[in-house]
Image: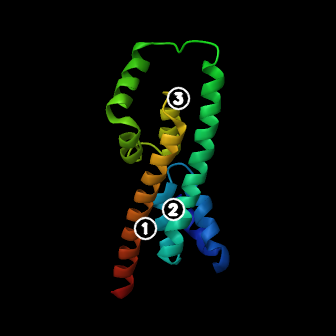
């Protein structure tokens, strides 16, 4: 799938290749980290590829967080949240790591879109979730974009 997205991006006219990176990065499991690498490996300047990947990932995450927030508000407006052992256990884990910890480390397990919606469903502030997810998306995108740039440079100099 990553190779197909890279080929799609390379096949676009150079002026709009960044748009291919934005679109690819909006896909869960591709996100900013693979999106930035796709852009770099497709030949985009890292200073274009990395921000484009971050923008695509952030846009999809924000849309899903706002949607999850509306659903949660509608679902809990007229009733008390139901409690069960599984939900309590997940809530304790969320309470242990908080929004920052889940945002920064959660992408190693699940896409930012899924972890952010889960945090909102547990009652986390949607603004805190969005803020910390943006920080996390940027860090992961910069890290993988930098690694892809270094790797591409090593391959082209040999």
Q: Position of residue 117 (x, y in %)?
A: 53, 36
Residue corresponding to mark 3 = 121
Say left or right for 78 vs 93: right
What's the mark number on residue 4? none
Q: Position of residue 126 (x, y in %)?
A: 54, 38
Say left or right for 58 vs 152: right
Figure check: 37 above or below 87:
below
Residue corresponding to mark 1 = 145
Label 2 SS: helix
Residue corresponding to mark 2 = 35
Is the C-beta separation of discs 2 and 3 under 8 Å?
A: no
Q: Position of residue 47 (x, y in %)?
A: 49, 74
Residue visible at 36% across and 21% down in the picture: 89
Label 1 SS: helix
Crowdedness near tag 3: few (<14), some (14–19) or many (≥20) residues, C-alpha within 10 Å:
some
Figure check: 70 above or below 26:
above
Check the image and name the residue furthest to the bottom: 157
Distance CA(mark 2)–CA(mark 3):
27 Å
């Amino acid at each position: 799938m990553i190779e197909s997205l890279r080929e799609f991006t390379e096949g676009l006219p150079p002026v709009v290749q960044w748009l291919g990176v934005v679109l690819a990065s909006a896909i869960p499991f591709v996100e900013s980290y693979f999106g930035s690498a796709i852009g770099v490996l497709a030949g985009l300047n890292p200073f274009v590829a990395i921000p484009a990947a971050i923008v695509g990932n952030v846009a999809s995450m924000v849309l899903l967080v706002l949607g999850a927030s509306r659903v949660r508000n509608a679902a809990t407006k007229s009733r008390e949240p139901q409690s069960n052992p599984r939900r309590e256990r997940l809530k304790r884990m969320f309470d242990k790591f908080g929004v920052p910890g889940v945002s920064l480390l959660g992408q190693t397990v699940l896409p930012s879109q899924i972890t952010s919606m889960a945090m909102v469903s547990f009652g986390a502030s949607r603004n805190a979730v969005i803020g910390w997810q943006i920080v996390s998306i940027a860090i992961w995108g910069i890290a993988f974009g930098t690694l892809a740039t270094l790797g591409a440079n090593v391959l082209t100099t040999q």
